[in-house]
Image (cartoon, helix red, strand yellow):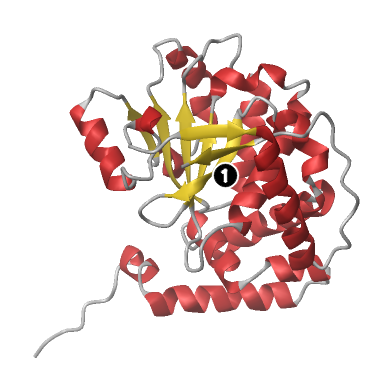
């Protein structure tokens, strides 16, 4: 006679029916709240699932995390940020959405810590990051919920690096208000001096996020294999071991962002506000 083995807690959490039930419970909880139309639109089944996954399917912790995010979104209003509000932050090409995806179909954000010298205040830097996160989510292909970050350390020094406060705020916002949006992070050819900076911020990084961090070096065999597994070399810029070219075009990127602002307004049911830009706006990056 066979005895049925009771599933362990970990096995339950990996069971689709268990996960679906948790999503339903969280959805029922959301239904008891007096939420704005915008908040309700945010709370899709996929969204609820990400919050549950981020808190290891603990319903109580997921509720708290989601409510914190809804409160943050209500006050910060990330869906209302427009390119004209942050264009000045993008002038150096320090962070931009590349026009390529990785092999998994994830949106790719290229970040250049050595070009953050034009950030005037930590608040401006954080606002620019939030705008690009919202834009990256908007441009995720159907069926893909995560993105890839590629940090290019060319020109990096402790004097040009992202301020510690901005870095801390960005890490907090990413982990708490964009759960399970990060697929992989590539630190491309970081200098040894970066270790001092990394030690200052690593305590703000949760273990789950830390597992997604990869240090990649151009002449390292394992690094090359990792990049080849993540990207099609035909589309990957030559700066990162591929065969494509990378060009940051200030005006072209601004044009793309202005077009996306219209899509953002339409998605959230907002009236698009006029765009006022300075000096030709900030540009983008085009890998071709």
Relative to residue 232, is residue 265 drawn left or right? right
Q: How many labels does the image show?
A: 1
Q: Position of residue 198 (x, y in %)?
A: 48, 21
Which residue: 42% across, 57% down?
105
Left or right? Give the position of 264 relative to 200: right
**Spot occupied by residue 255 in the image (x, y as percentages of width and height):** 71, 46
Residue under pointer 1? 175
Q: Where is residue 4 in the image (x, y as percent from the top left)?
A: 20, 83
- In-front residue for pair 109/209: 109
Q: Which residue is drawn at 53% across and 10% down?
A: 157
58 horizontally vs 104: left or right: right
Residue at 71 percent across and 41 percent down: it is: 254
Q: Residue furthest left?
A: 1
Please say if 221 is above or below 44: above
Nearer to me, 206 or 113 = 113
Looking at the rendered image, the quarter that the N terminus falls into is bottom left
In the rendering, at what x and y percent does residue 25 appear?
59, 76
- Specify whether residue 35 is in view: no
Q: In this view, does 178 lie to the left or right of 217?
A: right
Work out whether 148 lies above or below 27: above
Q: How busy is the neighbourhood of tag 1: few (under 14 within 10 Å), some, or many (20 plus)? A: some
Identify the residue at horizontal 54%, vertical 40% (top origin).
Answer: 286
- Residue 201 shows up from this direction: yes
Q: Which residue lies furthest to the bottom in this view?
A: 1
Q: Is mark 1 on a helix, strand or loop?
A: helix
Q: In which quarter of the image is residue 14?
A: bottom left
The front one of 284 and 168 is: 284
Q: Work out whether residue 211 or residue 207 is closer to the camera in this orientation and state it.
A: 211
């Amino acid at each position: 006679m066979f005895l049925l083995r009771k599933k362990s807690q970990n096995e339950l959490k990996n069971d689709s029916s268990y996960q679906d039930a948790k999503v339903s419970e969280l959805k029922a909880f959301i239904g008891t709240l007096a939420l704005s139309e915008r908040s309700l639109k945010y709370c899709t089944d996929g969204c609820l699932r990400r919050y549950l996954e981020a808190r290891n399917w603990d319903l109580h912790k997921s509720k708290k995390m989601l409510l914190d995010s809804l409160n943050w979104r209500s006050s910060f209003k990330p869906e209302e940020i427009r390119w004209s509000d942050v264009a000045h932050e993008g002038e150096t090409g320090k962070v931009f959405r590349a026009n390529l995806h990785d092999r998994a179909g994830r949106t790719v954000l290229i970040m250049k810590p050595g070009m953050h010298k034009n950030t005037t205040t930590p608040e401006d830097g954080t606002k620019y990051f939030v705008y690009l996160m919202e834009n990256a989510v908007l441009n995720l292909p159907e069926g893909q919920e995560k993105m890839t970050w590629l940090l290019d350390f060319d020109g990096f020094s402790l004097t040009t690096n992202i301020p510690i406060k901005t870095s801390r705020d960005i890490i907090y916002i990413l982990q708490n208000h964009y759960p399970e949006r990060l697929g992989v992070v590539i630190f491309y050819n970081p200098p040894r001096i970066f270790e001092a900076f990394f030690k200052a911020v690593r305590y703000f990084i949760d273990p789950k996020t830390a597992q997604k961090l990869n240090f990649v070096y151009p002449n390292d065999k394992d690094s090359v294999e990792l990049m080849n597994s993540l990207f099609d070399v035909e589309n990957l810029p030559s700066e990162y071991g591929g065969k494509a070219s990378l060009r940051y075009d200030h005006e072209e990127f601004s044009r793309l962002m202005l077009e996306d602002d219209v899509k953002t307004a339409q998605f959230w049911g907002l009236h698009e506000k006029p765009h006022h830009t300075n000096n030709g706006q900030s540009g983008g990056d085009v890998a071709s």
